Image (cartoon, coloured by chain):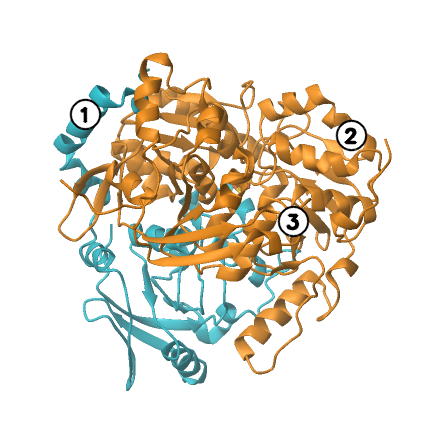
Amino acid sequence: MQPFTKLHGVACPLALASVDTDQLIPARFMVRSRSDGYGGYLLHDLRFAADGEKNGAFVLDLPRYAGAKVLVAAGSFGTGSSREAAVYALWDYGIRCVIASSFGDIFTSNATKNGLLAAVVAEPALTVLLGHLAAADSPALGVDLAQQVITSGSLSVGFEVDPARRLQLLNGWDDIDLTLRYSAEIEAYKGALLARQPWRLLHA
Amino acid sequence: MTTAPRTLFDKLWDSHVVTTRADGETLLWVDRHFVHEGSHHAFRKLDERNAKVAEPALTFGIADHYVPTRGRPAIADAEVAGMVDRLSANAVRHGFRLIGLDDPEQGIVHVVGPELGLTLPGLLVVCGDSHTSTHGAFGTYAFGIGASEVAHVLMTQTLWQRKPKRMRITVTGALGPHVSAKDLALHVIATVGVNGAQGHVVEYAGPAIAGLSMEARQTLCNMSIEAGARCAVIAPDEATFAWVRGRRHAPTSDTLDAALAIWHTLVTDPGAVFDREMEIDASAIAPMVTWGVSPEDAAPISGYVPVLQASDPVRASYLSDAFTYMGLTPGMALTDIAINRVFIGSCTNARLEDLRAAAAVLRGRRARIPGLVSPGSSAVKRAAEAEGIDQVFTDAGLEWADPGCSMCVGMNGDRLAPGERCASTTNRNFRGRQGPGGRTHLMSPAMAAAAAVTGHLTDVRTLPVLEG
Ligand code: SF4
């Protein structure tokens, strides 16, 4: 996994509350192979009319936010369906960090495992950030994960991230490599199950 | 030796710990892993590493999200067919059991798992689907995971987790006539908020919970994810043990006693401490419906669509967007909302008890609007047909279909047309969930049936009782 340390890039003030994962990528696109990229499906039904025409007015599609790497939302971002495709859509579009006042649990987990930072910024700082971006000549933010700080010019806002997830992102650790180091413990656990609770292994 | 009192969840957690790291991240053993068509991203990760499935005997594939509900086994859409075929191919290649399209046990994963006795008290169950919380109804630690985690479980049969906080919702009193677990669930979500239980596992306790059937408990635990909870648990009791006993994969005579001895300990000890506590009086709950685009946008059927409050601009803009999408006028009575479709199905409300409740309302009546009834599993379908329930639905003018996720998520092509408004027994009223531009109102099976009869949202308790 690609480590996340720092980034600086265009930041889009999405400002919407309760962006569920069905919004992030509608289910009908999930039959597609990811090899072509999921970026075009990101927030699809908010960005495109029923006939597939881009409506152009959606904030992410405004020219000033082209090439956005950071998305600043409101509360309850990524709630709902566990679909990791929501993270793929963000990633393939180019988003590397989402800032919100709260996230769905599964979304945060999925994001971390793909190297995408879900940064929690509480109110009122979040509103300050949103206002700053909307007013800025060139809307960009710096995000420093080691320092846990978001900056833009003289503006500096701290953010929260779970310590274990922060370490995983900073180092780009892959869970599976890590777990395989515990193979002996896993075998021992399974052995004890077989002896004492065989039904848990469907031996009964 | 004395041990500190523990909650039910603490016990479930402790009994699955393989190892705990210094930073608190804990490696947990997974007892049952369900995969479905949508798990293909995870299998691709295995391929990238040339890895095998660690425990194929504990892995079960179930075709539900993309399966057709009519005209089986043909699947017209090649991309949809590809999803179903890919699951079959992965099952063959990795040697795990597939409950596929043509299997007599096929159905929605969260209905089939318990039916087959794969879901048992004290187990840890995961699936790449957020409504895995359903299985918590059996005193099971069950939660939804993303594709990377599915791949991790496939390769190691374990999962890294950090212990969630514990929240107890004690439900006193009893639900009134025609008020169901779905109404209780919507009431909880409206009270707690759509992400209000984030980071918590919810234990439901109290006399109203003890009085719920196993089906109703599943409905309640199923919807807990909509309040942001990672999972929900209910202490197993005699009703649970009776339900589980004799199921295909449940422990039999040799091991049943040993299992029961453990299952009986799966209760919260007196004095155990929760991070949050909440109390609800079940007798005060009325049939609930949603009006908006989030499950927390729920109100008693006697209520009204909210009005815009200028004092809170974020809320006002959320509401006005929701009203536009849903085609509603602020302040209108919920019973004035006209419906043009009904869907009875999903892992929330398509078990036999749910179908009986809907059929009880529809018996001897005609639906004014078209609708689809998709039983939760093949076993539910057979049982319903044996009781003649299918006939009640078809006599009322609704379509009786095969089991699957169907119009809960629209992946198989069962979708609302843009602008269509549906009384639905599902779990999510997100924009476009049931089809682009579709408008979803969540409610119980009895309430969906009542809406079908009148053509608008209706308090099922106000329908006249039919003679005979
Ligand atoms: S019925 Fe709906 S909520 Fe349940 S598993 Fe299927 S898609 Fe998910």
As drawn, the label of residue B443 is: 3
Chain under label 1?
A
Residue under label 2, please give it: B392
Residues under labels 1 and 3: Cα distance? 45 Å
Above or below: residue B408 compared with residue B337: above
Percent of width and height locating residue B23: 16, 53
* Co-location on one chain, circles 3 and 2: yes
For label 1, being within 8 Å of ligand 1 is answered: no
Q: Earlier in the sequence, mark 3 or mark 2?
A: 2
Q: Which one is in front, B297 or A32?
A: B297
Residue under label 1, please give it: A192
Q: Which one is in front, B368 or B235?
A: B235
**Residue in the picture at 76% in, 58% down:** B335
In the orientation shown, which residue stands out farthest toward the right?
Answer: B467
- Supply the letter of whichever chain is cyan: A
Name the amino acid type tagged 2. Val
Relative side of B447 to B50, left or right: right
Name the amino acid type tagged 3. Met
Name the amino acid type tagged 1. Ala
For chain B, the rendered hue is orange
For the C terminus of chain A, the quadrant is: top left
Q: Which one is in front, B444 or B245?
A: B245
Res B396 quadrant in image: top right
